[in-house]
Amino acid sequence: MIDWIYRFARWTALFGGIVLVALTLMVVASVAGRALIGIGLGPVPGDFELVEVGVGIAIFFFMPWCYLRGGHATVDLLYMHTPRWAQKAVDTGSDILMSLVWLVLTWKLWEGMLEKKEYLETTFILQMPVWWAYALCLVGAVIGCVCYVAKTLTRFGLGSEPEGWTVESNAGH
């Protein structure tokens, strides 16, 4: 099961990358359109709204994979000089804390989505319902919750990382 979770997190990160590539192409088209207003072209309507939504979605889809690969920023000044048991305690404590933070984040995102849907809030230019963005981000947040819990379970020995998943290949601490 944990193997499947790790693979799924990789696929969601790839989806986030596709979203960012699409946003980049849209921004290039919008900037080129602005530069070529004289020949009848123009910017992409609502380009900044789409960038805001797209980047938020991409981040929520990247974060689970980043966490599983140990890609979060860390401060190693003291960590690397502590005994192995203390490093393991710090890693386990941070995993538990991150799981709790991610659960609260997902819960608040759910509440925010329901509120945006209830009040029919839309973006200014495109008039796109804001709750759509919240819903897509919520998908990434739920995937993140599953990944954070899975990694925490592996720390407690209640599961194992996928075959070929080596600590050395992770950025880790």
Image: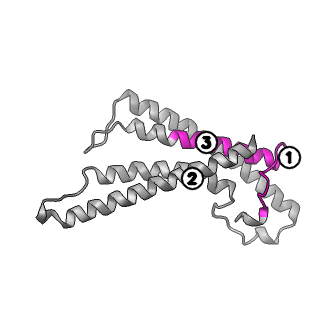
- Kindly indicate whether the residue at mark 3 contacts the one at mark 1 (C-beta within 8 angstroms): no
**Left or right: where does residue 106 sit relative to residue 163?**
left
Q: Tell me what residue is drawn at x 40 percent, y 30 percent.
A: 117
Q: What mark, if any, has residue 81 been given in the picture?
A: none
Q: Tell which of 15 and 65 is nearer to you.
A: 15
For marks 1 and 2, give the one nearer the viewer: 2
Q: Are marks 3 and 2 in contact (CB under 8 Å)?
A: no
Q: Which mark is residue 143?
A: 3
* Label 3, residues with CA under 10 Å away: few <14, some 14-19, many ≥20: many
For badge 2, the amino acid type reads Ala
Reading the chain from its start, which is encountered first: label 3 or label 2? 2
Give the alpha-carbon distance from disc 3 to disc 2, as whole Å: 11 Å
Residue annotated with mark 1: 157
Q: Identify which residue is drawn at 42% across, 50% down.
A: 54
N-terminal label among 1 and 3: 3
Determine the CA span between mark 1 and mark 2.
Answer: 26 Å
Q: Position of residue 38 (x, y in %)?
A: 11, 65
87 horizontally vs 147: left or right: right
Q: Which residue is mark 2?
A: 13
**Chief SS of the magenta region:** helix
Give the camera-side residue of 108 and 155: 155
In this view, the residue in front, 108 or 148, is 148
* Residue 45 coordinates in the image, percent (x, y): 24, 50
Closer mark to the observer between disc 3 and disc 2? 2
Over which residues does the magenta segment extend? 138-167
Percent across and percent down for residue 170 are 72, 63
